Image: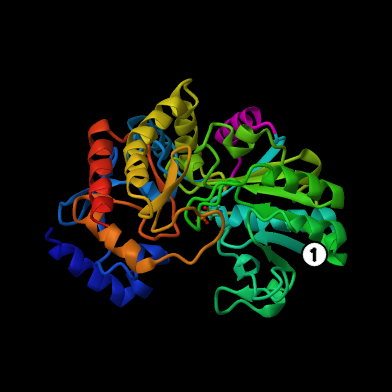
Amino acid sequence: MQRPKTESVYAKSCAVMPGGVNSPVRAFRGLGLTPLIVESGQGDLVYDVDGNKYIDYCGSWGALILGHAPPTVVQAACQQMAKGSSFGIATALEEQLASKMVALIHSLEKIRFVSSGTEATMTALRLARGYTGRAKIVKFTGHYHGHSDFLLIQAGSGVAHINPIATSKGVLPSTIADTMCFPFNDFSIRSFFRTHPHASDVAAVIVEPVAGNMGVVPPEKGFLEMLREETQAIGALFIMDEVITGFRVALQGMQGLLHLDPDLSCFGKVIGGGFPVAAFGGKTKILDCLAPLGQVYQAGTLSGNSVAMSAALATLKEIEVPGFYDRLAAKTERLLSPIRAQLEKKRGTGCLNAVGSMFSLFLKRSSVKAKEALDEEEFARFFRYLFERGIYLSPSPYEASFVSIAHTDEHLDYTAKTICEYLDRC
Ligand SMILES: *Cc1c(COP(=O)(O)O)cnc(C)c1O
């Protein structure tokens, strides 16, 4: 695979942007490859600036459930653009999308649109603190909720929630002092809720209902239900960060599949149809604490942007067609079942975690149920093997990969065959 133009653009990018990119994982660090420089996407394919094509299982980190450039979304966005792209004034489009989401998702009574998942979680937590008058936030190790300062922590050594360590320089110890971190899927957090003196200072527990940023790790049976119950008992809010899972695992998200009723939820990725749309929402009594009604401040120049809202509405129209998620599941099964069979045949080569159309293959593991240090060199070999054969997975062992409705049977079969080939040589 020749990539001279890619090399040249990347070299020039590195001179003017840190690492040549605007988000770190795009830089392919540790993979031993020059990163992709994309020219265009169509359906399940992306084309690089050298004209090479790749079957795309990253899908803009899960945003593109319809694949690249779906005609109805392109048309909706273009039509809106001709009418003006941004007003900073309320539009009927926002009302339409808000009404649709509130009607679809049982826990939502009101919603506010923002432009990134980072903003959604950051503001949901500010709102939780404003509403409860409490300071502390509980999160889980390996769960990613965007890059606001107070969420960039790891659990320290020793007792899980004591001594949080910032995962980024520039984050002050005072900023993370009220963020506590616990291991995901570990029911012993219950004793913290029931006996720890800090439990009554907890404003909110935020969780990815399916972890998607440490590889895909589904919740253990009863774990999320336990969090719902325990937060209720201590008067803290339960926040489901469905930025990946929302409209991905089902039309009603993971909360719909599990019949959970969170106080607040966050959305992003899929809902934007490839545009910067995110949202947080929940109970009216909580949402009404936001300005202009209440005293919790939040604002955004491009919040509810009309082109993005049009793309979101067009996306929703496609995914709410009955049978959409069944078709997506069938496509995912077509890809994953031969791989699963191969893993069965050659035990020890890896395990596959998947929920709906999101999946991760953990090489050389028999099971992954919490945040684990993964073998990055092993992943790099695997990634390169696929990349050189025109298959683009999310470029890190800690990221989820995704099947979209645009993936063709031919491409799914080719991908399964190639992955099985790789595993066969392990
Ligand atoms: C991607 C992601 C975010 C952050 O969203 P951005 O739009 O990248 O800011 C938050 N939470 C989860 C679970 C995510 O996967």
Q: Is residue 397 left or right of residue 42?
A: right
Provide the residue span drawn in magenta: 87-106
Category of crowding for the residue at label 1, using alpha-carbon neighbours closer than 10 angstroms: few (below 14), some (14–19), many (at least 20) = some
Depth order, front residue of 256/50: 256
Depth order, front residue of 208/417: 417
Total marks shown come to 1
Residue 251 picture location, percent across and down: 54, 31
Residue at horizontal 58 percent and vertical 57 percent from the top: 145
The part of the image, by quadrant, that contains residue 414 is: top left
Q: Kindly tell me whether residue 295 is visible in this rendering.
A: no
Residue hosting label 1: 135
Q: Kindly tell me whether residue 273 is visible in this rendering.
A: yes
Residue at horizontal 84 percent and vertical 62 percent from the top: 201
Residue at horizontal 72 percent and vertical 58 percent from the top: 126
Whether residue 100 appears in magenta in the rendering, the answer is: yes
User: Majority secondary structure of the magenta segment?
Assistant: helix
Residue 66 picture location, percent across and down: 38, 35
Badge 1 residue CB within 8 Å of ligand 1: no
Q: Is residue 324 above or below residue 253?
A: above
Q: Is residue 413 above or below residue 11?
A: above
Kind of residue indicated by mark 1: Ala
Q: Secondary structure at mark 1?
A: loop
Q: Quadrant of the N terminus?
A: bottom left
Q: Is residue 375 above or below residue 236?
A: below
Depth order, front residue of 15/324: 324
Whether residue 129 appears in magenta in the rendering, the answer is: no
Residue at horizontal 68 percent and vertical 62 percent from the top: 182
Taking the view exactly as shown, the residue that stands out farthest to the top is 322
Q: Quadrant of the C terminus?
A: bottom left
Residue 180 picture location, percent across and down: 71, 66
The part of the image, by quadrant, that contains residue 20 is: bottom left
Residue 188 picture location, percent across and down: 74, 57
